[in-house]
Image (spheres, rainbow, N blue to C red):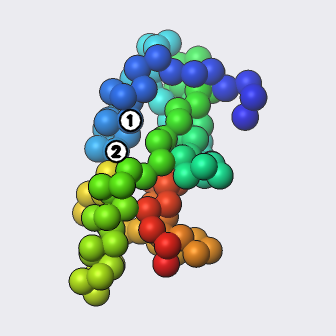
């Protein structure tokens, strides 16, 4: 989405997003998630709208780290269904094509 603005405090907003907390907008309102677009390089882009100004912002969600991918592979190797390493036990990974993806953050963590 070419007209979405970039956010300044990405790390803080990502931490709040993973925890399911309300994220404050720089315009005095809060962010409402409109959608997640997975990227080809393993990252994802979240599109948020400010509740006060209706301006749209995009937040890049980084691709899975080696540690996160290993954690998911270890759970799969143990015969269990893995949860998203970033969201914890609240979000189960689902099969999308050949990948296991978190539907909340749009990031692929392992090959299925």
- The alpha-carbon separation of the residues under discs 2 and 1 comes to 6 Å
Q: Can residue 40 be seen in this view?
A: yes
**On the image, numbered disc 2 is attached to which residue?**
18
Taking the spot 55% from the left edge, 40% from the top edge, the residue there is 46
Residue 86 location, x and y as percent?
Answer: 32, 51
Query: In the image, which disc is placed on residue 55?
Result: none
Residue 100 location, x and y as percent?
Answer: 48, 70
User: At numbered mark 2, what does the secondary structure look like: helix, strand or loop?
Assistant: helix
Residue 1, quarter of picture: top right
Q: Can residue 48 be seen in this view?
A: no
- Side (left or right) of 98 relative to 68: right
- Side (left or right) of 92 relative to 95: left
Residue 10, quarter of picture: top left
**On the image, numbered disc 1 is attached to which residue?**
14
User: At numbered mark 1, what does the secondary structure look like: helix, strand or loop?
Assistant: helix
**Closest to the observer, 96 or 48:** 96
* Image vertical order of residue 15 relative to residue 74, above or below: above
Disc 1 crowd, CA 10 A, few/some/many (<14, 14-19, 20+): some
Taking the spot 59% from the left edge, 26% from the top edge, the residue there is 57
Disc 2 crowd, CA 10 A, few/some/many (<14, 14-19, 20+): some
The answer to whether marks 2 and 1 mark residues whose Cβ atoms lie closer than 8 Å is yes
Q: Which residue appears farthest toward the bottom when viewing the image?
A: 79
* Image vertical order of residue 109 relative to residue 13, above or below: below
Residue 48 location, x and y as percent?
Answer: 55, 34
């Amino acid at each position: 989405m070419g007209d979405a603005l970039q956010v300044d405090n990405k790390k803080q907003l990502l931490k709040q997003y993973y925890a399911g907390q309300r994220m404050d907008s720089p315009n005095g309102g809060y962010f409402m998630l409109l959608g997640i677009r997975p990227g080809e390089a393993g990252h994802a882009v979240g599109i948020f709208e400010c509740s006060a100004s209706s301006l749209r912002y995009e937040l890049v969600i980084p691709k899975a780290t080696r540690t996160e991918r290993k954690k998911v592979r270890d759970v799969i190797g143990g015969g269990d269904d893995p949860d998203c390493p970033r969201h914890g036990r609240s979000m189960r990974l689902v099969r999308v094509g050949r990948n296991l993806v978190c539907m909340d953050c749009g990031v692929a963590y392992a090959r299925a």
